[in-house]
Image (spheres, grey):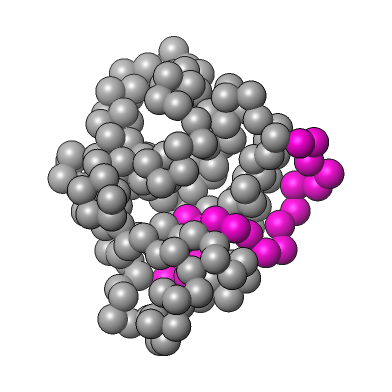
Amino acid sequence: MELIISGFGGQGVLFAGNLIALSAMREGYQVTYLPVYGPEMRGGTCNCTVIISENEIASPLISSPSFLIIMNYPSFVKFVPALKKGGTAIINSDLVKSEEIENLDILKKKYKLYFVPVTSLAESLNTPLLANLCVVGAFYEITKIFNKKNFKKALKEMLGNTKAHLFEPNLKAFELGANYIKNNYK
């Protein structure tokens, strides 16, 4: 799987990518994680690539991803044209409105598109900054590329002792994203 995650700085795009990579690595896959840091911080666009494979990975670079996680409209415009035919995209429907997308019917025939209101889901937990964990939960439910046990271990490792108190809110956001897919797409 070749995954690109993209959104505004401050949406936790890089954390989400690192968390997916670490969870898949704990599952026994070969993994690369490549954050793309621009001059922007919070508010600018940022992205990362994650490659998950059973085989050795030659390069962390991706030109035509098989999976996208799109957190904002500029990311949609930039990366959807590069998505492999038959590829999958999770799209933050709070910031990318389906009615604003040209040729949506054509895109739906070409790709598997999941419109998930991850910003609203996170806000329902009073933690708008956890939209990234909602989208990781949606990714998990769609792919099942790692199990929850390995995800929880990876999350604990990434939060460390100083942010251990954030484990439960992060887990709730993850579950909310996974349940959205279960209830709306399966």
Whole-percent x, y for residue 153 in the image: 47, 18
Magenta: predominant secondary structure element? loop
Q: From the viewer's side, name the closer residue of 128 and 102.
A: 102
Q: Looking at the image, which residue is at 26% across and 45% down? A: 182
Q: Residue furthest top?
A: 161
Image-quadrant location for residue 169: top left
Q: Which residues are magenta?
A: 55-76
Say whether residue 90 is left or right of residue 23.
left
Task: State whether residue 174 is above or below residue 165.
Answer: below
Say whether residue 28 is left or right of residue 116.
right
Instruction: Residue 102: tell me if it is visible.
Output: yes
- Residue 60 within the segment the image draws in magenta: yes
Task: State whether residue 110 is above or below residue 151.
Answer: below
Q: Looking at the image, which residue is at 18% across and 39% down? A: 125
Task: State whether residue 153 is above or below residue 83.
Answer: above
Q: From the viewer's side, name the closer residue of 98 and 37.
A: 98
Q: Looking at the image, which residue is at 83% across and 44% down? A: 58
Image-quadrant location for residue 177: top left
Whole-percent x, y for residue 141 in the image: 37, 41
Instruction: Residue 43: tell me if it is visible.
Output: no
Q: What is the tally of numbered marks visible in this picture?
A: 0
- Residue 81 within the segment the image draws in magenta: no
Q: Residue furthest right?
A: 58
Q: Looking at the image, which residue is at 28% across and 23% down? A: 168
Whole-percent x, y for residue 133 in the image: 37, 40
